[in-house]
Amino acid sequence: MLTLQQIRERSPCSEGWTKLLKSLGSPPMDTVISLGDVAKSNGAADAWWCVRALDWNNEQVRREVIKALIPAVERASKHTTDKRVYDCIGALKDWLDGKPADLDAAARAAGAAARAAGAAARAADAAVDAERAPADAARAAAWAADAERATAWAAWAADAAGAAWAAWAADAAGAAELEAQRADLIAAFPPLILKD
């Protein structure tokens, strides 16, 4: 949960901010909302942008965000056969379940997979972002689980997650993925104001 003031302090774009306020009925700045309210009003990209306003020193907050992010990472992982991406996802799930997990190693493995996929894509003159998306998403999720990297990840998510971690965000598959992320966020963070 977060307040409108916390979002405002992060300088949201005027279009997204206006849309959110209008959908909420222009409540006071101390109004508490959830990421689900933002997703319902503005969509997944704006909701992921708002993760930067959360308290990343709180491990429970990080766990809730990662739990909501895992379905998107798993969907993106269908675009790769690189075992390192799946190892990273496994480590994240272990961490979510309270089991020991080497998240630094998971982030390094996913990063290596992203670099390898990017190099292969460039060599083939392919779409680098589409190839890198699964590993980048997994690496970002691993970083988000780590308190020291959480703030950096939140800023990364604000920039990259809005594009669904892939070049295909602009086409029908990307639109479907953003809608799936919107549903994931609403399910994970039930709206406090914009209830059905």
Image (spheres, rainbow, N blue to C red):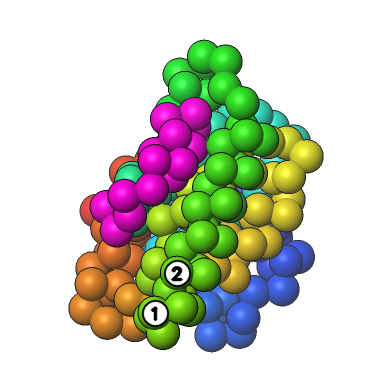
Compared to residue 9, the image places residue 99 above or below, namely above
> Which residue is at the front of the view, 131 or 163?
131
Secondary element under disc 1, as helix, strand or loop, is loop
Tell me if residue 117 can be seen: yes
Residue that carries the numbered disc 2 in the rendered image: 120
State which region is magenta.
Answer: 78-92
Name the amino acid type tagged 1: Ala
Secondary element under disc 2, as helix, strand or loop, is helix
Q: Quadrant of the N terminus?
A: top right
Answer with left or right where residue 10 lies relative to residue 166: right
> Which residue is at the front of the view, 148 or 17?
148
> Which residue is at the front of the view, 52 or 92?
92
Using the numbered discs, state the Cα–Cα distance from disc 2 to disc 1 in whole angstroms.
6 Å
Name the amino acid type tagged 2: Ala
Residue that carries the numbered disc 1 in the rendered image: 124
Q: Residues within 10 Å of mark 1 (few under 14, many from 20)?
A: few
Answer with left or right where residue 151 lies relative to residue 183: right
Q: Residues within 10 Å of mark 2 (few under 14, many from 20)?
A: some
Give coordinates of residue 40: x percent, y percent: 35, 62
Give coordinates of residue 41: x percent, y percent: 39, 67
Give coordinates of residue 45: x percent, y percent: 46, 68
Residue furthest toward the top?
99
> Which residue is at the front of the view, 64 or 21?
64
Residue 68 location, quadrant: top left
Answer with left or right where residue 30 lies relative to residue 122: right
Task: Please give the name of the residue rendered at 66% of the width and 35% of the height, measured from the top-left corner.
Answer: 104
Q: Are marks 2 and 1 in contact (CB under 8 Å)?
A: yes
Tell whether position 7 is magenta: no
Give coordinates of residue 190: x percent, y percent: 37, 44
Task: Please give the name of the residue rendered at 57% of the width and 76% of the height, measured from the top-left corner.
Answer: 17
Majority secondary structure in the magenta region: helix
Task: Please give the name of the residue rendered at 41% of the width and 84% of the height, measured from the top-left corner.
Answer: 125
